[in-house]
Amino acid sequence: MSNNLVIIPTYNEKENIENIIKAVFSQPVVFHILIVDDGSPDGTAAIVKQLQTAYPDRLFLLERQGKQGLGTAYIAGFKWGMENGYDFIFEMDADFSHNPNDLPRLYDACANMGADVSIGSRYVSGVNVVNWPMSRVLMSYFASKYVRFITGLKIADTTAGFVCYRREVLETIELDKIKFKGYGFQIEMKFTAYKCGFAVKEVPIVFVNRELGTSKMSGGIFGEAFFGVIQLKVSSWFRKYPKKKK
């Protein structure tokens, strides 16, 4: 059995799902995949079920009813991964904006370089984003600057969704207390890991905007992140965070 689980949340990703699964399975490091599908009406889950016949011991599917949010999908996936004994658990998009070839680098940062959390970072070595409109690049880049200013996080890409967690991190940070569902979820996870004393390392990647399917981005997601960061910082003054075991 592999110790590595890649969680891929999906909603209407029929154009990408087969190719992303095969690309992850082609890596030199052995990864298992858990697809968390929120009732995609386009048949994404049916495609995954067909592929499970070819990969019965590596490909898993968690079906949920309706769109419940990115954050809740990942938390459901994290709990499933821990229950099934995985030591390294990854977040990854289905649309190839995260290159599967970078998975071994995120794994290496946690398995061999002392990181508890490794982040596929768009901004740690400049701005490495391809095919985004400039307005969106600037919004994302300055959102991370804003988060750093408010929270004190020393992370260049605070909203990144390409992440590897050691199992110990997810066991420690009290997943049921994570409240945000969109971009705010990604910030809250990193902030909580940092407050618990875990080592975070950014691994430079090139982020490529999706070519197939439809983006799930919305103004509400950015709004949650903008106001949620202030709420997150204020609430941290009154919360006692569990600490990493030495």
Image: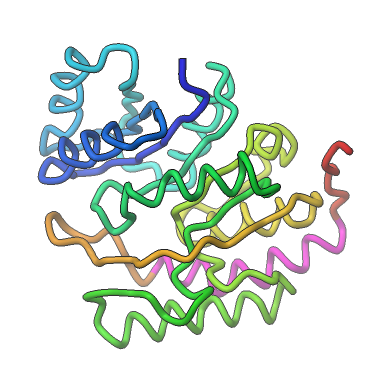
Q: Nearer the viewer, residue 108 or 159?
A: 108
From the top left corner, tell me how far across and down residue 23 is, in percent: 24, 40
Q: Which residues are magenta?
A: 220-238
Quadrant of the image occupied by residue 218: bottom left
Q: Position of residue 188 (x, y in %)?
A: 62, 57
The residue lying at 16 percent from left, 45 percent from top is 16
Q: Residue at x 29, y 31 (%)?
A: 25
On the picture, is 82 further left or further right than 46? Answer: right
Q: Tally the marks.
A: 0
**Relative to residue 164, is residue 237 depicted above or below?**
below
| Residue 113 vertical position relative to residue 143 in the rendered view, above or below | above
Q: What colour-coding does the image apply?
A: rainbow
Left or right: 218, with 79 as reference point: left
233 or 162: which is nearer to us? 162
Image x and y of residue 222, in percent: 44, 71
Q: State the image coordinates of residue 100 (x, y, percent, origin top left).
A: 32, 47
The quadrant in which the C terminus is found is top right
* Majority SS type along the magenta span: helix
Task: Say if the magenta span includes residue 176.
Answer: no
Looking at the image, residue 214 sits to the left or right of residue 201; the answer is left
Residue at the spot x=35%, y=24% of the render?
Answer: 62
Q: Nearer the viewer, residue 6 or 100?
A: 100
User: In the visual, does 79 lie left or right of 183?
Assistant: right
